[in-house]
Amino acid sequence: MNPKYFAALKLLSTMFLVAVVLTFAKKALSQVHFFTFIWLQMVFACSGILVYYLFLTPTTHAAAKGQNKLQALLTLIRQKRHRKALMLILVVGFLNYLMIRWLAIFALQYLPVTTHAYLTNYVALVTMFFSAIFVKEFPNAKQWLGALIAILGLWSYFKSAPKAEELIGIVAVALTVIGLATTNILLRKLHLLSNNPFNHAQIAVIAICTGGIPLILIGLMIDIPVTSISVENWVIIALNGLIANALIMLVFSQAMQHLKAYEASLLAMSAVVFIALLAVPILEQVLVFSQMIGIALMITGIALVQRYSSS
């Protein structure tokens, strides 16, 4: 299979899994404090990505020379010629896991899960604009038309003004979208570097631990002992850490080797469709007609952008 199509298929499948765990996260947040949820999921994310890197990835060239994988990674980090690539990864980790994940879960408290996913998917358009500015990957006229159609979807989705508490969530999602678009561009710039020595697993380890470990330390200082959490909610927290944090970082990092920044982000729009379908049986949240039209406009516009993306 064409590497670009395979990367797109893998990203699409991962977005379905993310949609499943995010829908259940909305349910869990009615019983678990959002900060407790955030830092505990990062425990599973950091643990999961380290286990994957140390035991499930192929032996690297450096490791074959007598170093274990962790030593090989530390050797790469210490080399001055790799500082630019390392700084990009550190900034991605700081933004994505110390700030954006916190904002995303915070916003989920105030918004229906479908609205949350719908607004988050506009990261595709912000990424497209940022791609033109920072990476010089310019959209064409048909893609700009697609962007306009997608933006019109906002008008249909929010036929009536959002409630005051929803506005808090909307602002948090807006900040999340800007942050996600920024990390998409940084990952794209990372993979455009000619001397980037880090593979996708190493990128994920550095990024997740950069943002996750500070959150875990803060949680251990101010949120211990953890209040009673049911087995079901522990499973939801664990799956959010492993899938919505660790797995998506791995898959997205791989996808950026074959897809442009806004192409990869556009494929993530599938999450809102998956979540809209899952929210009915799990959360009993049903969309009204104007919201369906809004989602349809967004998908049409973003699909137009994807259809006419340059190869």
Image: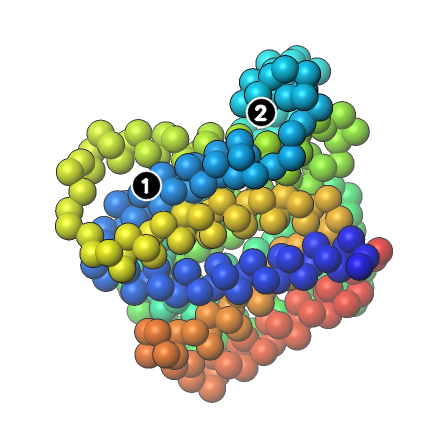
Colour scheme: rainbow
Left or right? Give the position of 281 relative to 48.
left
Q: Residue 201: horizontal and vertical position, in percent?
A: 60, 37
Residue depicted at 58% across the width and 44% down the height: 250
- Say which mark, if any, is on residue 39: 1
x%, y% of residue 298? Answer: 59, 71
Q: Position of residue 167 (x, y in %)?
A: 35, 61
Of 20 and 109, the residue lying toward us? 20
Q: Which residue does the numbered mark 2 point to in the structure image?
A: 69
Q: Residues within 10 Å of mark 1 (few under 14, many from 20)?
A: many
The CA distance from mark 2 to mark 1 is 26 Å
Residue at 50% over, 61% down: 17
When asked about the image quadrant of residue 67, the answer is top right
Marks 2 and 1, the one that precedes in the sequence? 1
Choose between 14 and 134: the one closer to the eye. Answer: 14
Mark 2 residue crowding within 10 angstroms, few (<14) / some (14–19) / many (20+):
many
Q: Amino acid at mark 1?
A: Trp
Report the residue that reaches farthest toward the right: 311
* Residue 119 visible at all: no
Query: Can the viewer see residue 192 in this picture?
Result: yes
Point 64% across, 21% down: residue: 63
Q: Residue furthest bottom?
A: 289
Residue type at mark 2 is Lys
Q: Tell me the quadrant of the picture where the N terminus can be found.
A: bottom right
